[in-house]
Every structure is written in structure tokens, then in C-alpha cells.
Image (cartoon, grey):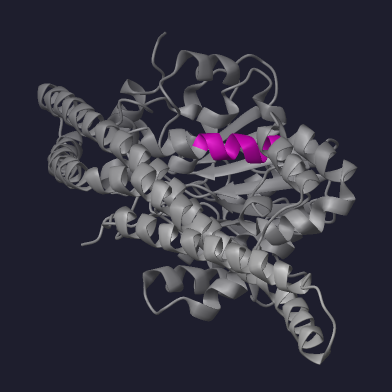
Amino acid sequence: MTLTSPNRGYPLERLEGNSGSMAYWSGLFTRVADRLGDLRTAVQSAHDLPGVGRAVTAVRTDASDLSGLLPADIAEAQLLAGVMQRYADAFDAHAKPANDLIDDIETAHAEWSRLNMAADHAGRAAMAAAYGDDQDKIDDTNDAVTEAIGDRDAAKEALDALWTQYEGYYGDWDTAYAAALSELAGGGGTVLTNEARDLLDALLAATSPEDIYRLWLENPELQDEIIKSHPEIIGNLDGIPWDVRATVNKARLDELLETEPEGPHRDELEAIVRALNAAGTPKPNLISFDPDGSEQVTAALAYGDLSTASEINTLIPGMKGNVGDLFSWGESAKALNDSVGPGSATVVWFGYDTPELLEEPAMDRAQDGAAALRSYLLAVRALSPDADVNVIAHSYGSTTAALAIGSQPDGLGVTSFIAVGSAGFPNDPTVVENLTNGKPPQIYATISEDDAIARIGRATAPGHPVSPERLPGTTVFDSDGGVDSSGGSLPSATGHDALGPGAYLEPGSESFYNVSEIIQTGQPGTERGGEGSTQGFWDADNWWISDEYALIDF
């Protein structure tokens, strides 16, 4: 199995080259340039040859013609000499250290894999124990999970540190290689003007989406140049207008599909295309797209015009979510817009690597995802300052969203934070304080009486055991069946799924109906325990897990 770096997707491979040979050829080209220079001097002398007559005139003419050709040949030889030497130096500085790290990375990866498997076994044991009533066994297995996760995470940190070094060396070598090719092509390629480079540097150094938006609008004459040079940056830079990002990302997606071979990666790209081409109008916009910057292909689709919407809703998936599900989530997004009415735009945000089952107890995925989500939400607020911003998060998505929204006392400008089937909020005093300080956002939460997975997830997760339903100020709404305002029956959520029959966000369900009503009115549309409500396994006496891990005292 070929390993790839986690952040930039570089293959763990030995970079081939011989700096000594490259330096040798550089020297030869230098000597060629010197000899051509001597020839030019001789030609110049012939050009100044004194005398008259046909023979002398012919020599002068030939010398003049040759004199016009030599500068280009000299310049080419000098270019080749310089390129070869600079690349030789870059190979020594970057490629060789990258090669030296390969054995260390392979060893560290093997150790992390071993400890990851151990954490897997510990997690399975803890989940099995959670079904029983032996509290000592539950505590012991939870302690074992914590220790196993700690060992695994320490190994991951060591591996990540090695990968960071490797990516730095590999990236610098790759840049040097691209620069060499660009020079050999006569300066062709994506070389920015000084003005465009300064703007790009300023955009990347900006501290907020507001600053990025301002810089972008202030420099319209440089926008096309930067887009052509770095579409992967502009398509994902929070603060760049959504329509610009959507156009750039769609073009990148189409270009990638022209050469992407058959396999899982192409399957993910084609899943995005299916969602983009789904029936109905208007078509969604691909407002973020990262095909290779993380373990999963990440993307976000916007249904409706974000620039004019008065209600901007964001759907966030949980455990095991990936872009292969975009089509189904898109159908839910369209249904939500239809239910809320004119002025509603909904984003399906697959902007982070969601956890697998055995990663769910840890906070790693939430921490990475929260950083990306925080930036996105700040961009929403910067580009649509007057809109209501509603976040609807399922399962581990609510863990990620809570970490992002609770990072600041103002909740990042979010109006409503709606958690469905939450895997638990982070066990972090600052996050809990910011989410319960009486300021926006208003928190809403529901958990089905038949959702064992969410409850077990909270019980076996040291980092996110906080039940949002028990937080002060939370508005709890039902998902166990009810009736709408016209008396129509609303099906219950019968498990943990987000989409599909018996799921939280299935259009027509009680949970979906309440989400729509919250966005429109600020209140759920059904009465708790009201007409049509059903009982589930976790009702009444079976709430022991939820009670015990409801809210940690700080």
C-alpha cells in the first residue's frame, strides 16, 4: 500500500535524481555559453573588418546575420545552465531530506495502525458494556478506551509531525520542479504579475472573511489573473463571493473528471456531479470543493441564492457522512427551502472528514471540522449580514458544530442551532458557557426514543458526553410522531439515521416539520408528548444512559 501525506496528498515515494549529474550538465552548458560568447566577439571583429570589395562585404553580411542569431543561443545555454544548477541545489535541499524521512514515516505509520486497532477493540468492548447494567465494567471499559485513545493519539501526533516535515520538503521540491519547467518553457505557466502576487499574499494573510471580501472587491482588475493562476485557492477561500467560488469549483471538477481514472476517488467526484445535475431548479452551486486536501473529498452545495436569502440554513452530516450522500442531502435541502418558503437558501456542508464508528468517541474529527465550519460561518455572516443563519446538525455533526459555534461568546452570528440525534456536545467549559450565556444562538434539540446510537455515543465518548437536551435554555422538540397544524400525521424518527424513512431529516417527518417551523417562527410546530406521540425503548425508565451523562458539572 502506498501511503500519502494527510494534508496535501503527496505520495510517500523516493524522489529520484542526481544532483552531481545535474551540476555537471550545468557546467557544460556554462562552457557552451562562454564559447558562444567568444564566437560573438570574433563575429563582431569580422563585422568591423576593414577594406572594400565583394569578399569583404560578404564577410560583413554573414557576420551581421550570425551576430543576430548568437544572443538567443547564448541566452538559451545560460538558461539551461542556471535551471540545472538551481534544480540541483533544490534537490539537495529538499528531495534528499524527504527521502531520508521515508523509513521513519513507514515505521511511525505501522505503530499508529497497531494502536488504532487496539483503540478499536477497546471501543467495541466499551460499546458492548454500555448495553449492560454492570457499572464497574462500564467504567473500566471507558477507562480502557480513554487510555487506548491517548496512546493512539500520541502516535498520531508523532506521525503527523513526520508528515509535516515530509510535506514541507516535498512541497518545496515540487515547487522547484515546477519553476524549472516554467523557466524551460520560456517563462510560460501561471506566473503572476507583482500586483496580483501582492493581492494573493494579502488575501491569504487576511484575518477574517470580511477582510478577504473587501480586498477582493477593491481589486477587480486582478481577479481573473488570480483565478486562472490559483483556482484551488479562490474556490475555497471564505470571503470570496459565492458565485465566483461556484464557477471556479465547477470548472475544476469538470477538468479533473477528464483525466481521473476509475476508482473510489472518481466515484466521489461523480457523486458531486450527480448532486449538481439533480432534477429541479435552480441548480445547486458548488461553493467549496477540495478533491485531495483531506482523507475524503469535501464539498458544499448551496441550494438557493445565498446573496439574497433572508434565511440561510446549513445541514451538517455526522458519522460516516461523505459526498456520496450529497444527492440525498440535496433533496432534503430542497424540501426545506420549499417548506420555509421564499427567501430560504440551504447549504449541504460536507466540509470535513467525518469519523468512522471507531473514531466517533474521540474529538479529532470535530476539532478539524470545527475550524473549517467556523471559517464558513464567518463568511456567511460577512457576505449576508442581514440574514438569519440556521445550523441544523445531525449526530457527530452537532458535536463539530457545537465546538465551532461555542468557540466565541457571540456564537459566530448564528441565529438558531438545531441538533438532531446529537452524539453529544463537547465536554469543554468554554464551549458550554458560550452556548448557555443567554445570547444567540438559540439551541434546539431532539432525540428519538428509539435512537440508541446517539445515547451510546455520548456514554462512550470522554470528549463529548454533554446532552444538548439538558443544557439550560435549550428548546427541546419531539421527533416521535405528532400532527401538523392542519391535523395531518407526522411520522416519528425510528432510529439514528438522518435521511430516509424513519429518519430525523426525512421530509414529512415530525422532526423535519419542527425544524422548518423553528426556522420560520422560532418555535417547534408540535407539542411535546402531544397527539400522535409514541413511546420508544429509551422512554421513561430506560433513560439511564442519558441521565448519567446528561451534563457534566464544571
Which of the 4 image quadrants contains residue 540?
Answer: top left
In the rendering, at what x and y percent does residue 530 appear?
57, 41
In magenta, the rendered stretch is 370-378
Residue at (66% x, 55% y) in the render: 235
Q: Nearer the viewer, residue 453 or 306?
A: 306
Q: Is residue 335 visible?
A: no
Outermost residue on the bottom side: it is: 54
Whether the magenta-drawn stretch holds residue 373 is answered as yes
Quarter in which the N terminus is drawn: bottom left
Residue at (59% x, 74% y) in the render: 255
In the rendering, at what x and y percent does residue 543 appear?
33, 31
In the image, 155: left or right of 334? Answer: left
Q: Is residue 543 visible?
A: yes
Whether the magenta-drawn stretch holds residue 372 is answered as yes
In the image, residue 386 sits, relative to residue 351, either above or below, namely above
Quarter in which the C terminus is drawn: top left
Which of the 4 image quadrants contains residue 155?
Answer: top left
Residue at (68% x, 58% y) in the render: 229
In the image, 241: left or right of 530? Answer: right
**Dominant secondary structure, magenta:** helix
Q: How many marks?
A: 0
In the image, 531: left or right of 158? Answer: right
In the image, residue 208 sits, relative to residue 57, either above or below, namely above
Q: Nearer the viewer, residue 492 or 265?
A: 265
In the rendering, at what x and y percent does residue 449 appear?
40, 42
Q: Nearer the viewer, residue 451 or 103?
A: 103
In the rendering, at what x and y percent does residue 484 appear?
67, 52
Which of the 4 image quadrants contains residue 24?
Answer: bottom left
